[in-house]
């Protein structure tokens, strides 16, 4: 987007802080948990955090919140790094919460020594039963008044592997009657004998998110810790830890997540789709993951544009996926090469055309002044789309029909003279004649036609596989409907068709995005190889989905 926009509320805060001299520079972080692939919601957070330090003096860290060894994998770490780079951003430091495990352990010891933390033998069910309700206070654990010495000894034994999973936790000692239920003696550490993707088997106790997050921010001197609205109740606990430990005072700010219709972005649900084979994998072009969008043909520019258009706000709302599709259409219209591809071919024999092949020149992209031109072969046998012909057309039908004339894109005007059929009455080919002086760019025929068709030369048409992707779900909010969200999967989200492309497609392997004339925008798929070209549909030329829903 080129037009100037007003500051969002976080930018207004930063402006005030810099003007008041509170900070000389700002430091933000993007802190994903490496338990899945990034999705379009994460892209908004990436653009916000990295965008702020492009606009203001400072830098952004990439920090992996790797405190749960049973769900985290190096594969996810690598995919996240690739996605952030692909979106056009660079981090100053690559960090991990696991980098701070020794420091966090010492912080916990500090809290025990201040009598602000204790080891609890209660089970998770017992702790839940003592938690109370928003209107009723909780009950103190019978282990809450252990001595500092006993707590220090037990916590060290926890670290050394003396106890089984789930038998003990370390809890903060705050207030079991607190109005904010997250302040009712939250768990800081749990026992988990599991191999960690970076620290191996060094640890068998792991910090909880609320204990690791704010302290990691503080260690890194994060000035503006930005997260989504569900963390508003956590801010009080975030500040409590920092105050009690007397460490660098990072501060948390919250913005509203943007939900997108016809989509799910829960990592748990996305993992379900992958594991149950409803999609091919995390990078399936129907998935809302960054890698899925990339494979489908979305550009970093279009995703950044989308994130800027939806903006940053304090109230959650539903974003129409049509806006994301609009952003990619806008960008691809400027950069995509134009090519002609016929999906359901009907042979056209031009009976008065000489038995020779000529070369026609046509532009690669009318929107790009530097796009150049390409040559196309034209002869007396071409292929057109079957649905561009109708034997008994209605009024105002401007495509090909008996006796009717149309223009072939970048070529000649032709007229349908005869329809050839097989024994069952199916149309097999058309005999047409061409108007000799009607060549595009040199037309002196004076004939005006209203229809223009795309086509390919029959003799050198290249067979390709085309994967027509559509929205993965058939309802606006699959998670808000009754029943299992997977019941609302769109059975027509993928159709595979055979296409016949102009041969320029064979030499376009350095280009990766195309407009197939009158069809939509497409890109090479990663499974494409010489002799077996595969294309994914990125998006239709127009918002066809809205039209279909109105029909329904």
Image (cartoon, rainbow, N blue to C red):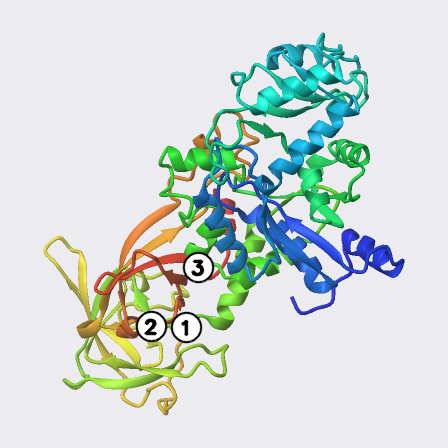
Q: Residues within 10 Å of mark 3 (few under 14, many from 20)?
A: many
Left or right, residue 448 beside residue 238: left
- Which element carries disc 2, helix, strand or loop? loop
Is the residue under label 2 in contact with that under label 1 (CB below 8 Å)? yes
> In the displayed image of the protein, which residue is found farthest to the left?
423
Residue extending farthest right: 20
**What residue is drawn where x is 31% and y is 57%?**
466
Q: Work out how far the residue at label 2 is from the one at label 3, CA to CA, in angstroms.
A: 15 Å
Can residue 309 be seen in the rendering of this structure? no
* Residue 319 in the figure: left or right of residue 523: right
- Circle 1 is placed at which residue position? 337
- Label whose residue precedes the other's in the sequence (2 or 3): 3
- Foreground disc of the pair 1, 2: 2
User: Reading the chain from its start, which is encountered first: label 1 or label 2?
Assistant: 1
In the image, 115: left or right of 130? right
Q: Position of residue 187 (x, y in %)?
A: 67, 23
Number of the label disc, if any, that sits on residue 297: 3
State the SS at label 1. Answer: strand
Q: Secondary structure at mark 3?
A: loop
Q: Is residue 10 visible?
A: yes
Picture coordinates of residue 303 (x, y %)? 56, 57
Q: What separation in Å lies between label 1 and label 2 (alpha carbons)?
A: 9 Å
Q: Please, is residue 475 above or below residue 162 in the view?
A: below
Q: Position of residue 47 (x, y in %)?
A: 63, 56
- For label 2, the residue is 508
Within-10-Å neighbours for mark 2: few <14, some 14–19, many 20+: few
In the rendered structure, which disc, 3 or 1, sits on the residue that comes first in sequence? 3
Mark 1, other Cα within 10 Å: few <14 / some 14–19 / many ≥20: many
């Amino acid at each position: 987007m080129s037009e100037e926009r007003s500051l969002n509320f976080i930018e207004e805060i930063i402006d005030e802080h810099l003007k008041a001299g509170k900070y000389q520079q700002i430091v933000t972080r993007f802190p994903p948990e490496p338990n899945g692939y990034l999705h379009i919601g994460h892209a908004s957070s990436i653009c916000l955090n990295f965008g702020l330090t492009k606009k203001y003096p400072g830098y952004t860290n990439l920090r992996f919140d790797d405190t749960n060894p049973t769900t985290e994998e190096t594969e996810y770490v690598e995919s996240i790094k690739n996605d952030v780079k692909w979106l056009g951003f660079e981090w100053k430091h690559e960090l991990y919460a696991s980098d701070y495990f020794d420091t966090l352990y010492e912080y916990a010891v500090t809290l025990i020594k201040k009598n602000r933390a204790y080891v609890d033998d209660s089970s998770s069910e017992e702790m839940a039963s003592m938690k109370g309700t928003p209107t009723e206070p909780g009950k103190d654990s019978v282990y809450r008044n252990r001595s500092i010495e006993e707590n220090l000894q037990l916590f060290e034994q926890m670290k050394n592997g003396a106890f089984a999973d789930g038998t003990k936790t370390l809890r903060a000692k705050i207030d079991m009657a607190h109005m904010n239920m997250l302040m009712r003696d939250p768990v800081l550490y749990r026992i988990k004998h599991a191999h960690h993707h970076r620290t191996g088997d060094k640890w068998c106790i792991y910090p909880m998110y609320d204990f690791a997050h704010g302290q990691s921010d503080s260690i890194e001197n994060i000035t503006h810790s930005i997260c989504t609205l569900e963390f508003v109740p956590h801010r009080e606990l975030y500040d409590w830890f920092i105050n009690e430990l007397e460490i660098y005072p990072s501060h948390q700010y919250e913005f509203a997540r943007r939900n997108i219709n016809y989509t799910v972005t829960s990592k748990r649900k996305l993992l379900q789709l992958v594991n149950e084979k409803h999609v091919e994998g995390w990078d399936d072009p129907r998935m809302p993951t960054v890698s899925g969008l990339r494979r489908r043909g979305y550009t970093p520019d279009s995703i950044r544009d989308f994130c800027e258009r939806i903006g940053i706000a304090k109230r959650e709302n539903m974003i129409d996926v049509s806006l994301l599709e609009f952003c990619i259409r806008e960008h691809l219209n400027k950069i995509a090469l134009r090519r002609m591809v016929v999906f359901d071919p009907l042979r056209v024999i031009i009976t008065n055309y000489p038995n020779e092949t000529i070369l026609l020149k046509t532009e690669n992209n009318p929107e790009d002044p530097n796009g150049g031109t390409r040559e196309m072969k034209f002869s007396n046998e071409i292929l057109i789309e079957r649905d561009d012909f109708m034997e008994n057309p209605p009024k105002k039908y401007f495509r090909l029909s008996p006796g009717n004339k149309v223009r072939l894109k970048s070529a000649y005007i032709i007229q349908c003279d005869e329809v050839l059929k097989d024994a069952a009455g199916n149309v097999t080919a058309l005999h047409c004649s061409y108007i000799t002086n009607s060549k595009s760019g040199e037309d002196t025929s004076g004939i005006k036609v209203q229809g223009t068709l795309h086509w390919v030369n029959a003799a050198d048409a290249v067979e390709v596989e085309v994967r027509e992707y559509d929205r993965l779900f058939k309802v606006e909010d699959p998670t808000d409907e009754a029943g299992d969200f997977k019941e609302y999967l769109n059975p027509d989200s993928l159709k595979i068709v055979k296409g016949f492309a102009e041969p320029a497609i064979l030499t376009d392997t350095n280009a990766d995005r195309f407009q197939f004339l009158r069809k939509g925008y497409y890109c090479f798929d990663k499974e494409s190889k010489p002799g077996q070209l595969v294309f994914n549909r990125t998006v239709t030329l127009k918002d066809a989905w809205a039209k279909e829903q109105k029909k329904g």
